[in-house]
Image (cartoon, rainbow, N blue to C red):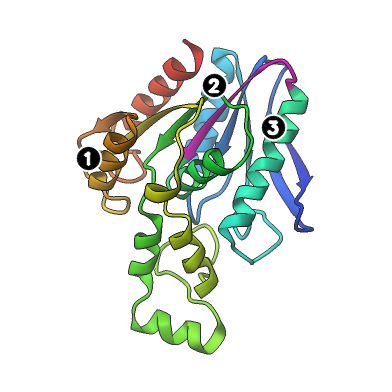
Amino acid sequence: MEKCTLHSRHGYAIPCHITYQGETKVLIVCHGFGSSKASPMVQALEKAMPESGVGVVSFDFPAHGDSPVWDLHETWCIDDLETVEAYVRGLVPQGELFYFASSFGAFTLLNYLSARPHTGRRAMLRSAAVAMGRLAESWADEKARADMAEQGYFVPDYDYVREMRVTPAFLRELKDHDVFRTYRPGETEVFMVHGGSDSIAAPEAAREFARRFGIRLMEIPEGEHDLMGPGQLEEVLAAAKAFFTT
């Protein structure tokens, strides 16, 4: 695995991890909210996918991981994904591109697939936060609203990799990018895996989204949001290998 930085169109560096040894297939990985390219799921993909002939490129969204900025905008996340895809397409101009995205990353990927030119053939969504707007609004309790009024942002009460600063503008962006309304199925085949006991991204929302758009959904009954219970990571990796290599 190598480190590199790409140049965002908004003037900051996009930190990336590149696990690539000349493969003709490359997987772009999008992490979840408050996570990073160094998450256990991303690391597991960086190890498992090259064994199946698929390179991996992961990156940090703005305000996540090693990102040098604190500003968090959904449009910037979408822009950065577009920048990463352009870089990967340069690595494999005649090869195949795929996507793997978790939670908020899956929400962002769905918006990206609906609004931007892309060449990825398949996308796997893990614990997709398809109701991300409603989820983020649920964090905005009385204290959060007071913090936003006083300092312009609030910090959700979760154990994230780094302090996450949620602004009113970001909340509005999430609502404006409601994937139940904005998603447009295209040529990219989408596959979802979700925990039946997910207490963060409601499985009911994932089921409804999959039903509405005709997406195949694999549900792990006892799975929580991270899908890291006994044997669950192995299930996710086996599903990813099958989806991206057959």
Give the residue pinned by disc 3. Answer: 18
Earlier residue among tags 3 and 2: 3
Above or below residue 83? Residue 49 is above
Q: Is residue 25 magenta?
A: no
Give the residue pinned by disc 2. Answer: 49
- Is residue 62 something one can see in this rendering? yes
- The percent coordinates of residue 13 (x first, y second) are 76, 52
Three-letter code, disc 2: Met
Q: Residue at x 26, y 32 (%)?
A: 219
- The percent coordinates of residue 155 (x first, y second) are 47, 72
- The percent coordinates of residue 147 (x first, y second) are 47, 84
Crowding at mark 2 (Cα within 10 Å: few <14, some 14-19, many 20+) = many
In this view, the mark in front (1 or 3): 1
- The percent coordinates of residue 159 (x first, y second) are 43, 61
Marks 2/1: CA–CA distance: 25 Å
Above or below residue 40? Residue 7 is below
In the image shown, does 122 or 69 lie closer to the viewer?
Answer: 122
Magenta residues (range): 92-101
